[in-house]
Image (tube, helix red, strand yellow):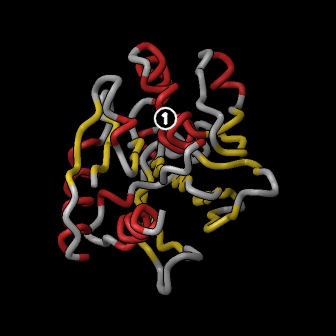
Amino acid sequence: MKIGVIAIQGAVSEHVDALKRALTEKGVEAEVVAIKHKGIVPECSGIVIPGGESTTLCRLLAREGIAEEIKEAAARGIPILGTCAGLIVLAKEGDEQVAKTSQELLGIMDTKVNRNAFGRQRDSFEAELEVDILDSPFTGVFIRAPGIVSCGPGVRVLSRLEDMIIAAEQGNVLALAFHPELTDDLRIHQYFLDKILNC
């Protein structure tokens, strides 16, 4: 089994490390690979789109030909996890900031996003979150975090903060406004691995 982390920009090593630790805890053997060019996504059983700068991320995904491969993987039911900027990239619709920068969103998830829902870099914070897929609170790390403004009927809302949707799931796709890879709590990565193993 191979799990790919998009590695053209953003918080890559933390996700790779979290996935490796989660796999070890589960006693599952799998290769975690960094995806920097096209041709790797089709070989993967799961894909992570990490945080970073969403405009740059969208542009590079399109330029490298990875965007189309992710769309095809999503259509095949391959589990995909998007965190922070990854949540924006997965969305069907953005706000005026997304329109202004002509971001090419993947449109995989039936969501509309607010790119800077929780302010800028200096407004970073942590919050204890109730997340439907977990049995106790999760510490969410928010760094220039986006949020989901609205979503279609096929999207399951998993968590909210200040009336903003910050975690959601649509079939094989999981999107988070926060950074689970920046904590020692592996439960969300474990949940994502379960989606891959049950795929």
Q: Would you say 92 lies left or right of 175 here?
A: right
Please name the residue that numbered disc 1 is placed on: 70
Q: Quadrant of the N terminus?
A: bottom left
Q: Picture coordinates of residue 16 (x, y %)?
A: 23, 51
- Of residue 163 and residue 152, the one placed in the foreground of this image is 152
Q: Residue at point 42% right, 30% down?
A: 53
- Placement of 63 over or under 163, stated as above or below: above
Residue type for callout 1: Ile
Q: Picture coordinates of residue 71 (x, y %)?
A: 55, 34
| Number of dots carrying numbers | 1
- Of residue 177 and residue 168, the one placed in the foreground of this image is 168
Q: Judging from the image, what secondary structure is the residue with disc 1 in?
A: helix
Q: Which of the 4 image quadrants contains residue 193?
A: bottom left
Report crowding for label 1: few under 14, some 14 to 19, many 20 or more residues within 10 A (C-alpha). many
Q: Which of the 4 image quadrants contains residue 141?
A: bottom left
- Of residue 99 and residue 193, the one placed in the foreground of this image is 193
